[in-house]
Image: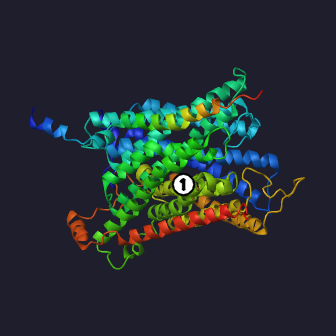
Amino acid sequence: MTNNAIFRTCPDTGLRFHGPAETLIKLNAVAAVVFLLVGGIMGIGVGLTRWPEVHLLGPQDFYTTLTSHGINVLIFWIIFFEIAALYFVSSVVLGCRLATPKLGYLAFLLMVIGALVNNYAVWSLSSAVMMTSYAPMPAHWAFYLGLILFAVGALIGCFIFLGTLVIAKKEKTYEGSIPLVTFGGLTACIIAIFTIASGAIILVPTLLWQLGYVSNIDAGVYRLIWWAFGHSSQQINVATHVTVWYMVGALVFGAKPLSEKVSRFAFVLYIAVLQIASAHHLLVDPGVGTEWKIFNTSYAMYLAVMASMVHGLTVPGSMEAAQRARGYTNGLFEWLRKAPWGNPVFSSTMISIVGFGFLGGISGVMMGAEQLNLIVHNTLYVPGHFHATVVLGTTLAFMGITYWLVPVLFRRELILTSWCKWQPYIFGLGMTGVSVFMMGAGTLGLPRRHWDAAFTSSSFPYEFPSSAMALMSLNGLSVVLAAIGGGMFCLIIVGTLLFGKKVGQEEKFPRVMVATPPTEAQYVTLHRSGNAISGTLLLAGVFLIAFVVYYFINWKYLAETWGMS
Amino acid sequence: MNENDQEEEKIPIMQQLIDNPFLLLFIGIAIPTVTYIIWGIVEIVSIPIAN
């Protein structure tokens, strides 16, 4: 072990923080929140323009704002936070030094420069090509350069994570297998390496094309490989937020996974097949055949879906088991009623689990079926779906763990504690509305990626059902609510960093930061009762029924598209 | 062969797989590269060029 002077032991958690690792976690987490703020403000512009009665921005500003919104929140906020999470679940959870901290600073610098260059290109160099930036639609070369620099920085971060695992094993800071949350981090890291490599494969030639060194970029190949980058980047999110779910279960309830083997195997399924679900973006693409589409979505993707359902069962199941072991055994849901709903770490996580499963998961499987995809492809249904997965699922989970991380890392008390209690509900409700109403409008045919989705100013107008317009108005209201919740989060976190009451390095917070796990004897008594997770099983049954009903409703809807007589 | 060696031999294959991050990395890169990227590119370049 290297110099112990650069380690500190947290008095609240008992975790050992390596100095450079702690600094890098802070830097990446703060950068993440800054880009969330920027991207969130852009999101307000997008939402208010899609609100028919408001229609805030003109076409040029709308596409610029939409591009900025997509890249800042889907890439920069998320990946900065994920790098912070990777450093935490490796160096801090394993209690070892971070590998090559100097490279970590270089990685962070590259990511910041890349993000700034990309934002500059979007706003000042006419690169409103949206996040997908489909070639041959050209952006300024700085747009691609910014993304490449950011990706290189993130890739270095991934290898630092792997290096830290090697150090921990060599220095024997853990016994047996790595902890489950570190294994979840490893899953995210592997998916990130595939994602970033795919991005490099397609963005480097596109940069050279814009610089005049390459004559042509094949549009079909661009779409294929870009989605290996664009969608897989969202799969990094899934692996990371599931990791956060497990972590919150342990922190808030002292819960242990129902079966580590099953949870680890579900992560292995993610590693093997989650990335290829990117194919569902190309289900109407004429360049690839049916066999390719069906294998990569309707077969392989279902293995990843099964893995998500395993996590969706085991995380709340482990919370229930811990609560029941403590004596909350009355009825099916006393464990849930007595859960700490005023603790934003827990409430954010629970809303994340429900929103990701019921809204994002079910709609994602529906869209992943080649035939059903025809109903909603390139409609507002798609952003509705991914606001459920990436915002309700990932962002809310990250917000939740931030409420725990900020006091532990920065040794400051959270400010505006009553706001902290309400923020997850306001943001969650707003974003649920955004997801549901956009999915509804998309089902009625409203296109995505269009400034004037209703074609009211088109030479060839198309009359959408008036209910579609009503849904977009409700979406606008939901955007405002979500923006209030997002603004509250940024204010609480930035305010805490600046004005939160300082707590000394040796001093403890006045509340419990890590719950004491139930004893083995309590678990034994629980298992003898034969009623360890009955509430969760009932909720899982409700989920499966909702899944099946929604799936078949869409087949019925598809069947009615073309009348047969 | 001592007792420790015998214990090491008992580690199941799945456990060995799960405990080897670089093997998992290979799996996580190889499967999507073959089934998504390479297969997809083969399909696209197989499209006949219009005359």
- Numbered circles on residues, count: 1
Task: Examine the image and state in which quarter residue B36 appears.
Answer: top right
Q: Is residue A352 left or right of residue A202?
A: left
**Residue A396: % across, % down:** 53, 58
Residue in the foreground of this view, choosing between A180 and A495: A180
Residue in the foreground of this view, choosing between A373 and B27: A373
**Residue A260: % across, % down:** 31, 53
Point out the residue furthest to the left here: B2
| Colour logic | rainbow
Say which residue appears at 39% left-offset and 74% top-offset: A338
Q: Is residue A353 left or right of residue A324?
A: right
Say which residue appears at 68% left-offset and 41% top-offset: A286
**Residue A7: % across, % down:** 33, 40
Q: Tell me if I can see residue A113 in this picture.
A: no
Residue in the foreground of this view, choosing between A561 and A136: A561
Q: Which residue is mark 1?
A: A395
Q: Residues within 10 Å of mark 1 (few under 14, many from 20)?
A: many
Is A232 located above or below residue A509 in the figure? above
Point out the residue furthest to the bottom here: A331
User: Which corner quadrant holds the N terminus of chain A?
Assistant: top left
**Residue A242: % across, % down:** 44, 53
User: Which corner quadrant holds the C terminus of chain A?
Assistant: bottom right
Point out the residue furthest to the front here: A565
**Which amino acid type is marked by label 1?**
Thr
Q: Is residue A370 left or right of residue A181?
A: right
What kind of element bears circle 1? Answer: helix
Indicate the chain on which mark 1 is placed: A
Q: Tell me if I can see residue A74 in this picture.
A: yes
Point out the residue furthest to the right here: A459
Say which residue appears at 73% left-offset and 63% top-offset: A563
Q: Is residue A275 left or right of residue A438?
A: left
Say which residue appears at 35% left-offset and 49% top-offset: A264
